[in-house]
């Protein structure tokens, strides 16, 4: 598979399915996958809030730490992260610093905030990731929102 032939819908659905697995395992319903330029899934990450109640344990941030400490920059600059929800400001910063080429996401931060409300375990920042990336010195392509209803369905009944 070439980079231009990446199936964004199928790969995003895979990250949404991983968010269901995170929820089923008793964690917050977020997950993401790192995909190489040839379409190979290089890493998968669930939200890491549990078991230590790590408020910075967002799936994207943890995945970027793992990726940037184990994969080459030459590879990462061609990679895409597929994430069930739009990266928050912290996660967008981690994606930027890791050097990824592209982000594909499901649910927007704004819509996530409507779902979670003022939940103490997820005080959502309603700040589009494009705003964070625009402050940087290199472009990060953003595709999303996509499959919003599917991404939102994983959260139904969780935050109430």
Image (cartoon, grey):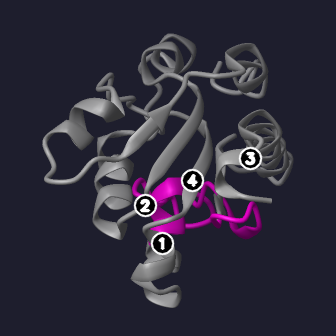
Depth check, front residue: 20 or 142: 142
Going from N to C along the chain, the mark reached first, 4 or 1, is 1
Residue at 77% of width from left, 67% of height from top? 40
The disc label shown at residue 81, or none: 4
The image quadrant where one finds the N terminus is bottom right
> In the rendering, at what x and y percent does residue 27 appear?
70, 50
Q: Can you say whether 31 is above or below 108 in the image?
A: below
Rounded to the nearest angstrom, the CA distance separating label 3 from label 4 is 15 Å
Which region shows up in magenta?
A: 36-64
Rounded to the nearest angstrom, the CA distance separating label 1 from label 3 is 18 Å
Q: Is residue 77 left or right of residue 46?
A: left
Going from N to C along the chain, the mark reached first, 1 or 3, is 3
Evaluate if marks 3 and 4 touch, with contact meaning CB atoms under 8 Å apart: no
The local secondary structure at tag 4 comes to strand
The local secondary structure at tag 3 comes to helix
- Dot 2 alpha-carbon crowd within 10 angstroms: few under 14, some 14 to 19, many 20 or more: many
> In the rendering, at what x and y percent does residue 95 appear?
38, 57
The residue pinned by badge 3 equals 5
User: Which of labels 3 and 4 is toward the front?
Assistant: 3
Residue at 64% of width from left, 22% of height from top? 146
Evaluate if marks 1 and 2 touch, with contact meaning CB atoms under 8 Å apart: yes
Going from N to C along the chain, the mark reached first, 4 or 2, is 4
- Dot 3 alpha-carbon crowd within 10 angstroms: few under 14, some 14 to 19, many 20 or more: few
Residue at 72% of width from left, 21% of height from top? 147
The residue pinned by badge 2 equals 100
Going from N to C along the chain, the mark reached first, 3 or 4, is 3
The image quadrant where one finds the C terminus is top right
Based on the picture, tell me whether residue 50 belongs to the magenta stretch: yes
The local secondary structure at tag 1 comes to helix
User: Which of labels 1 and 3 is toward the front?
Assistant: 3
The residue pinned by badge 1 equals 76
């Amino acid at each position: 598979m070439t980079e231009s032939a990446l199936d964004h819908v199928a790969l995003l659905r895979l990250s949404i399915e991983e968010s269901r697995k995170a929820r089923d395992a008793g964690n917050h319903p977020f997950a993401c996958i790192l995909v190489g330029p040839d379409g190979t899934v290089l890493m998968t990450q669930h939200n890491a809030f549990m078991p230590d109640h790590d408020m910075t344990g967002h799936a994207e941030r943890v995945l970027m730490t793992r990726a940037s400490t184990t994969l080459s920059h030459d590879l990462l600059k061609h990679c895409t992260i597929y994430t069930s929800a739009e990266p928050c400001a912290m996660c967008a910063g981690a994606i930027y610093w890791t050097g990824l080429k592209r982000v594909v996401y499901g649910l927007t931060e704004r819509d996530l905030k409507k779902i979670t409300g003022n939940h103490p375990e997820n005080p959502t920042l309603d700040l589009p990731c494009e705003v964070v990336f625009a402050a940087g010195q290199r472009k990060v392509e953003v595709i999303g929102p996509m499959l919003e209803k599917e991404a939102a369905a994983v959260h139904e009944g969780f935050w109430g």
